[in-house]
Image (tube, grey):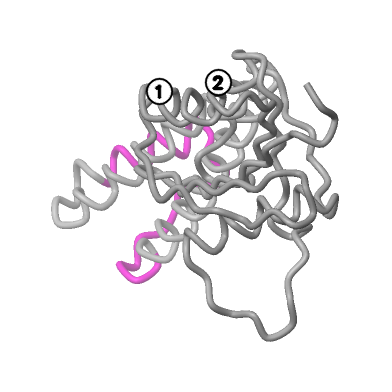
Amino acid sequence: MAQGSTLFMGLDVHKETIAVAYVAEEREAEVLSLGTIGTRQCDIDKVIRKLQAKGKPLHFVYEAGPCGYWLYRYLTKKNLKCWVVAPSQIPKKAGDRVKTDRRDAMQLARLLRSGDLTPIYVPVVEEEAIRDLVRSREEVLRDSKAAKVRLKAFLLRQDIRSEGRANWGPAHLRWLAKVCETKPPPCVILTGSRKQRGRSRACN
């Protein structure tokens, strides 16, 4: 195939839809929108077949975001070239604040052709799983800390004083259980806070 025959594909990826645009490598070529497709594999395969019928290699790009890297892995598994780029690294024109899925896809295709995009590193599945585990642990510990602050404030408003050190150790938790038994009104809040704390202890 000719060196200048690549089709640069811009994808604006969302949970349920993907806006698709492409442009040929020739400088005079215009950026064309293919509209919006679904995120099912059959939807993606249909677009791939349509453009591969032109007999030109495809080069995809989309922004990193909440949808993750599944699309990158799906395309590269088919031996298709795909880049994922950081939104903060995408050049933007001053004063250009109008954003639509169609415009974003076309802009990605245009910038990919001009060489103004730099791909980010995409972790392998195992590495991403470790990242998710670490992130989840941090979130649980943060929630646990916030729950303890709320519980202390609640006990203070109820004039319930700890009999020992409020260090959330076994003795302190037994004291909280005793409070639930002897003071029925606060029991619902205390029980919920203790369950929150119990879930986070596995992460400590």
**Residue 107, placed above or below residue 15:** below
User: Residue 152, can we see it?
Assistant: yes
Residue 12 percent across, percent down from the top left: 53, 50
Q: Which residue is mark 2?
A: 74
Q: Of label 2 and label 1, which has the lower sequence position?
A: 1
At a point 51% along the width and 30% down the height, the residue shown is 201
Q: Which residue is mark 1?
A: 41
Residue 79 percent across, percent down from the top left: 67, 14
Magenta stretch holds residue 12? no
Residue 56 percent across, percent down from the top left: 67, 27
Q: Is residue 80 left or right of residue 193?
A: right
Residue occupying the far left of the picture: 184
- Which residues make up the magenta segment? 156-179
User: Residue 165, can we see it?
Assistant: no
At a point 30% along the width and 37% down the height, the residue shown is 177
Q: Quadrant of residue 129?
A: top right
Tell me whether the residue at label 2 lies in contact with that at label 1, contact meaning CB atoms closer than 8 angstroms.
yes
Callout 2: few (<14), some (14-19), or many (20+) C-alpha neighbours within 10 Å? some
Question: Which of 89 and 185 lies nearest the eye of the viewer?
Answer: 89
Q: Is residue 25 left or right of residue 138?
A: right
